[in-house]
Image (spheres, helix red, strand yellow):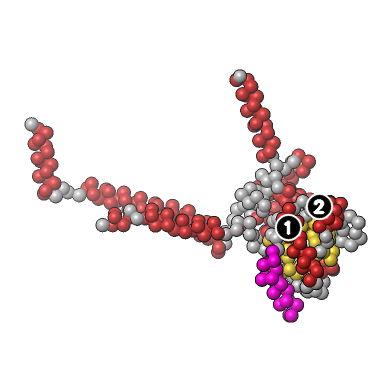
Amino acid sequence: MMGRWLAFIPLVVFAVMALYFGMGLREDPSAIPSQLIDEPLPAFDLAPVAGSEQGLSNADLAGHVSLVNVFGSWCPPCAIEHPMLMQIARSGVVPIYGVDWRDTPEAGAAWLARHGNPYTAVGLDPESHLAIDLGITGAPESFLVDAAGRVRYRHVGMITQADWTETILPLIRELDAS
Amino acid sequence: MMRALIACLALALALTSAALAAPSPDEAFADAATEHRARGLYTQLRCVVCQSQSIDESGASLAQDMRIVVRERLVAGDTDAEILDYMQARYGDYVLMLPPLQANTLVLWGLPFFILLLGGVLIVVYVRRQARGLASELSPEEEAELAALMDEEGQ
């Protein structure tokens, strides 16, 4: 009698594994949780792109809510995300600061001249020092930083219209109000 | 024909080994002991772009920059543990190839040992049951059947 029930064990094991792996398939393996949420933005002082005097440092972000966007002229999804950033910049809701990652000053400047410049200030991170401090895994990636310089939200990948209206904009309103 | 085949194989081998040795020679330390430490640390850190590779194996540009950071920390005089902590503080437990033993990884580390123990117990139980079965006396019906079979064989 006992033996008959034992015969079902492989089936049960299979069912449990199928369920577990099925759940695993729905998760995005590239989504690594950020270590920076509610932590201060790391210190940085980045050089400007070609033809610009102003780079980017922590001082630029002080005293107001900011959106920090990591991009690169070599990054196709960044070009797709770009019109959304232009739209955000036009709305004047939040200043956007650009981190031009693994780029040359000339390539960065040429890219901005071609696609438009939504950034209040842009700094170069040619050797990934800031990118690694931020825990970046790929571009584009964006961080919402509060007035005190703490990271409040991290967005991996392109910011879509839905991300903006449903997640980021409400967060900015909330941070501005507090 | 054979010679050409061998030449092709040798070329393929040379190309693959070149591709596997991701950290380029110009990245290496002159000092062999420090280089050995650096390579050891590379194998313990995960490439966050190509997630099933260590930064030692990966050719991704971010992995290359992570190797540079490791070398900078080595030059600055950090210990191996400090360098791993440095990366862990930025990328989380995820960046370590060997998951740390802590509350949320207890099942991960404990399950193999638990299954081994369970298997051991099951084997002991099974063997004991078998042994008991062999030692037991035959029932009267079985005795009769055995006698009948023996008779048949005798004829």
Please tell me the numbered disc located at residue A149. Answer: none
Name the main secondary structure of what is drawn in magenta: helix
Crowd tier of the residue under label 1, counting other residues whose Cα lies within 10 Å: few below 14, some 14–19, many 20 or above:
some
Name which residue lies at 11% across and 48% down: B141
Provide the residue designation for mark 2: A103
Chain letter of disc 1? A
Callout 2 and callout 1 share a chain: yes
Say what amino acid the circle numbered 1 marks.
Ile
From the top left corner, tell me how far across and down residue A79 is, in percent.
Answer: 75, 56
Q: Which sits in the foreground, A25 or A149?
A: A25
Tell me the CA gap for discs 2 and 1: 18 Å
Front-most of A161 and B60?
A161
What amino acid type should be assigned to the residue bearing mark 2? Asp
- Residue A28 visible within the image: yes
Q: Image quadrant for the C terminus of chain B?
A: top left
Image spot of residue B117 (x, y percent): 42, 54
* SS for callout 1: helix
| Residue interval drawn in magenta | A160-178
Vertical placement of residue B60 versus B11, above or below: below
Judging from the image, mark 2 belongs to the subunit labelled A
Mark 2 is surrounded, within 10 Å at the Cα level, by few (under 14), some (14 to 19) or many (20 or more) other residues, namely many
Image vertical order of residue B32 relative to residue B11, above or below:
below
Residue drawn at x 36%, y 53% as measured from the top left? B122
At 71% from the left and 77% from the top, the residue drawn is A174
Residue A80: numbered disc: 1
